[in-house]
Image (spheres, rainbow, N blue to C red):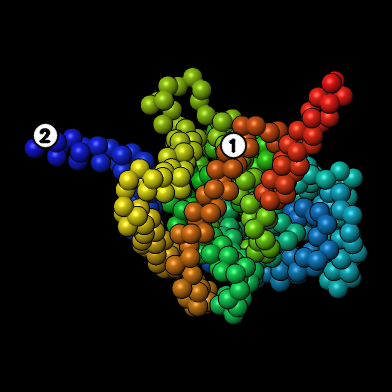
Amino acid sequence: MFDIFWERSLAFLLFWGIWMLAPLAIDATMALVYMVMVYIFPESKERASIPDLSYLPYVSVVVPVHNSADTLFKCLHSIVNQQYPLEKIQIICVNNGSSDGSFDIYSQFQDTYPLTNMNWISMESAGKSIALNAGIYMIKGDYIINVDSDAWLDKYAVLRMVESFEHDPLLVAATGGIHIDKELGKQTRFIDIIHYCEEIEYLVAFNVGRRYQSLTNNLFTLAGAFSAFRRDVMLKSFMYSERTVSEDTDLTFHLRQYQMKGQARMACISSAIAYVEPISSWSKLYSQRVRWQRGEIEVSALYADNNKKFIGGLGNYAGRMLVVDHTLAFSRMTWTFLIPFLYFLGYPLQLVLAAFAGLYVCYLILDFLYFLVALREAPVVYRERVKKIWWVMFFLPIYRFITYWFRLSGILISMSEPGNWKTENPVQQLREALHSTKNGLLNKVRGFWVKE
């Protein structure tokens, strides 16, 4: 009797442990490590030790422009409205293939602020990497700050960046904190809930995830929307490349491997904030996450040490990312397909539903703890703003589960298609695939009848 009980217990633990509890345990362990480190070493403690600067260096802000007529004025206004001397800011706008009135907006802004040091470079072909590189070659400042034309900066963003660089001579590059440009809690439509989930996701990603990466000097991506660099370090690098769909991550890995000598480091300065427009639709969210995931895989593969065996490869940062994020992706996939299938294998429906409910509660607790730690580091005004959407936490596990599937799609696409910045609407992709299959079958049928 004992043997039968032991065998069943072992089978139960192996089944649930390998396919369900293992990914959850890894997620929980990583979350605990992140939160403890960030709680013990908050950025606010570092910032309190930074004295006021007696000298403010010259900075160059590069803004790549592509069909940005609707957002460019607000972006440029946020730059000239900084709590930083305007005479020490150079703005370089690089137009790459715009077909709208972006230049007219630039001209209008220049007329409104004639004393601003501004330059416009126009390039015929589209390409963010090429535009950024062209702008970087025109810089005059000690520091380079890249800002997307559809983003706008908090008034202390440039000052916070410069303070961090001047205080820490070992800091070679930094990313700012990214948040969405939306009034939180005012509306409760479906798309608004998606935006609120996106905002909390960014809050946790930059105040916890990238803060932990900063503490361990393993920053994964210098966010393309808002990042800063020392001039000499950037000019010695290969700058931005088009060999992957994630040029910002590629540059981050390049700096880590070839430019960061000795104790040099990169960091996330979450108190330097840029705001971006929220995702406008599910298809845009899908496209964004597929590109992020695809870029992560492409860059990790480029910098992974292929000569090391599996265990040795775990010592490589890219190797660890591939194991944790991508290998476990396929075990997480079973949560969707295997758990419902248990019902058809004779498991009670109550047990199947309880399994889903248990996973939801576990991840809800994790997200709630992440949220509390991230909120602790946020500015007081922003903290009050985010508290208005505390109830979104109950939707967050579902939101993360959906975006996980988008990311999984990115893994599969990276193995089957050439790199591209744009990923189609998933519904449109399905329709085109079905249409193509239908046409193929009809052509075969017609060919059969013609042959007969």
Task: Answer with left or right where residue 263 lies relative to residue 344.
Answer: right
Who is closer to the viewer here, 90 or 250? 250
Q: Can you tell which of label 1 and label 2 is closer to the viewer?
A: 2
Instruction: Residue 65 in the image: state x and y as whole percent.
Output: 80, 55
Label 1 neighbourhood size at 10 Å, few (<14), some (14-19), many (20+)?
few
**Residue 139 visible in the picture:** yes
Residue for badge 2? 3
The extreme front residue here reads 452
Residue for badge 1? 412
Task: Answer with left or right where residue 238 lies relative to residue 107.
Answer: left
Q: Residue at 24% of width from left, 37% of height from top? A: 11
Q: Residue at 39% of width from left, 62% of height from top? A: 364
Choose the circle earlier in sequence order: 1 or 2.
Answer: 2
Q: Residue at 67% of width from left, 55% of height from top? A: 283
Quarter that holds the C terminus: top right
- Disc 2 marks a residue whose amino acid type is Asp
Secondary structure category for the residue under label 2: helix
- Disc 1 marks a residue whose amino acid type is Leu
Who is closer to the viewer here, 347 or 209? 347
Instruction: Residue 408 in the image: state x and y as whole percent.
Output: 55, 43
Task: Answer with left or right where residue 354 lies relative to residue 144.
Answer: left
Q: CA distance from mark 1 to mark 2?
A: 43 Å
Label 2 neighbourhood size at 10 Å, few (<14), some (14-19), many (20+)?
few
Number of numbered discs on residues: 2
- Rendered view: 112 above or below 323: below
Q: Residue at 39% of width from left, 59% of height from top? A: 360
- Rendered view: 316 above or below 22: above
Who is closer to the viewer here, 386 or 394? 394
Instruction: Residue 337 in the image: state x and y as whole percent.
Output: 46, 45
